[in-house]
Image: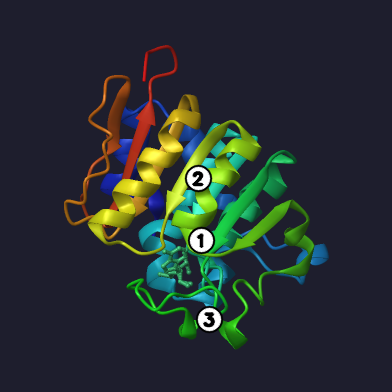
């Protein structure tokens, strides 16, 4: 697949996240392997989930993190770490930023969340993420409703948020409402599998930068200068 030919590419460009030339350059990087990182390249993060996952959202998380150059990225839902590794690849190439991930893991599951953790390799979220990329990674184990508020207070500013834990309306609304006050001007919040959950991003100061077209990815952006 060529990212630059997709509708999502047009949305990224139209939203002012980057221009077409920058996108083409970033796309090339996805295939560039690094000897020091097990000879792997970002596209190979597909081994942690699937090629479809990389095409639908993983590659775009990489593009977004390269474009925004975030100091702090927060994500919920790691499992084997496809999204996690692609964000870490971008931070590595930015030479800047930390990723804070929350995953229920096996130990703190209360049995009520909708996405099974037991697809996770050996029950350890992100176990097989490339070791050299983990320097910029901070994993918190627990349900997002228990861990996310403290994590947001700790990091104080969130430049990019990726939701991929329990997609129930209740949990999505909780996560977005928790993170929103900490999002920096120009920052982005995103998710896939959007089926109308109440994200609350219709608040003043936010715009839908990437609407729900195939591939199913939504990105809301906080205005660089506005309220919210
Ligand atoms: C769809 S998987 C994440 C996939 C991952 N982002 C990727 O790209 O491969 C969902 C993960 O969310 C975790 N999870 C489910 N409900 C959760 C909750 N309420 N809080 C935190 N993590 C949760 C599960 O343990 C599972 O590992």
Q: Along the horizontal axis of the image, is 122 left or right of 56? A: right
Residue that label 2 marks: 63
The residues tagged by marks 3 and 2 sit, at their Cα atoms, a distance apart of 25 Å
What secondary structure is found at the residue carrying circle 2?
helix
Q: Reading the chain from its start, which is encountered first: label 3 or label 2?
A: 2
Please report the residue visible at 43 percent of the width from the left and 12 percent of the height from the top: 225
Relative image position of residue 16 (x, y in whole percent) = 39, 25
Q: Quadrant of ligand 1?
A: bottom left
Mark 1 vs ligand 1: CB below 8 Å: yes
Mark 3 vs ligand 1: CB below 8 Å: yes
Relative image position of residue 35 (x, y in whole percent) = 80, 66
The dot on residue 83 is 1
- Confirm whether residue 24 shows in the render: no
The residues tagged by marks 1 and 3 sit, at their Cα atoms, a distance apart of 14 Å
The dot on residue 120 is 3
In the image, residue 176 sits, relative to residue 202, either above or below, namely below
Q: Reading the chain from its start, which is encountered first: label 2 or label 1?
A: 2
The residues tagged by marks 2 and 1 sit, at their Cα atoms, a distance apart of 12 Å
Q: Residues within 10 Å of mark 2 (few under 14, many from 20)?
A: many
The dot on residue 20 is none
Quarter of the image with the C terminus is top left
Please report the residue visible at 40 percent of the width from the left and 57 percent of the height from the top: 57
Q: Quadrant of residue 195?
A: bottom left
**Residue projecting furthest to the left:** 196
């Amino acid at each position: 697949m060529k990212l630059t030919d997709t509708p999502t590419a047009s949305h990224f460009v139209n939203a002012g996240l980057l221009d077409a030339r920058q996108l083409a350059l970033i796309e090339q990087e996805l295939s560039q392997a690094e000897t020091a990182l097990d000879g792997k390249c970002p596209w190979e993060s597909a081994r942690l989930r699937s090629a479809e996952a990389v095409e639908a959202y993983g590659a775009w998380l990489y593009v977004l993190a390269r474009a925004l150059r975030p100091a702090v990225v927060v994500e919920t839902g790691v499992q084997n770490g496809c999204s996690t590794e692609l964000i870490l690849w971008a931070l590595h190439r930015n030479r800047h930023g930390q990723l804070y991930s929350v995953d229920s893991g096996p130990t703190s599951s209360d049995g009520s969340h909708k996405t099974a953790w037991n697809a996770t390799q050996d029950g350890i979220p992100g176990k097989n993420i490339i070791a050299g990329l983990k320097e910029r990674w901070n994993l918190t184990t627990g349900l997002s409703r228990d861990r996310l508020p403290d994590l947001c207070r700790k990091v104080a500013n969130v430049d990019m948020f990726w939701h991929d834990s329990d997609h129930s309306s209740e949990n999505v609304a909780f996560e977005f409402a928790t993170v929103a006050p900490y999002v920096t001007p120009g920052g982005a919040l995103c998710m896939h599998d959007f089926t109308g959950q109440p994200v609350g991003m219709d608040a003043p100061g936010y715009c839908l930068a990437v609407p729900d077209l195939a591939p199913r990815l939504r990105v809301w952006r906080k205005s660089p200068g506005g309220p919210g």
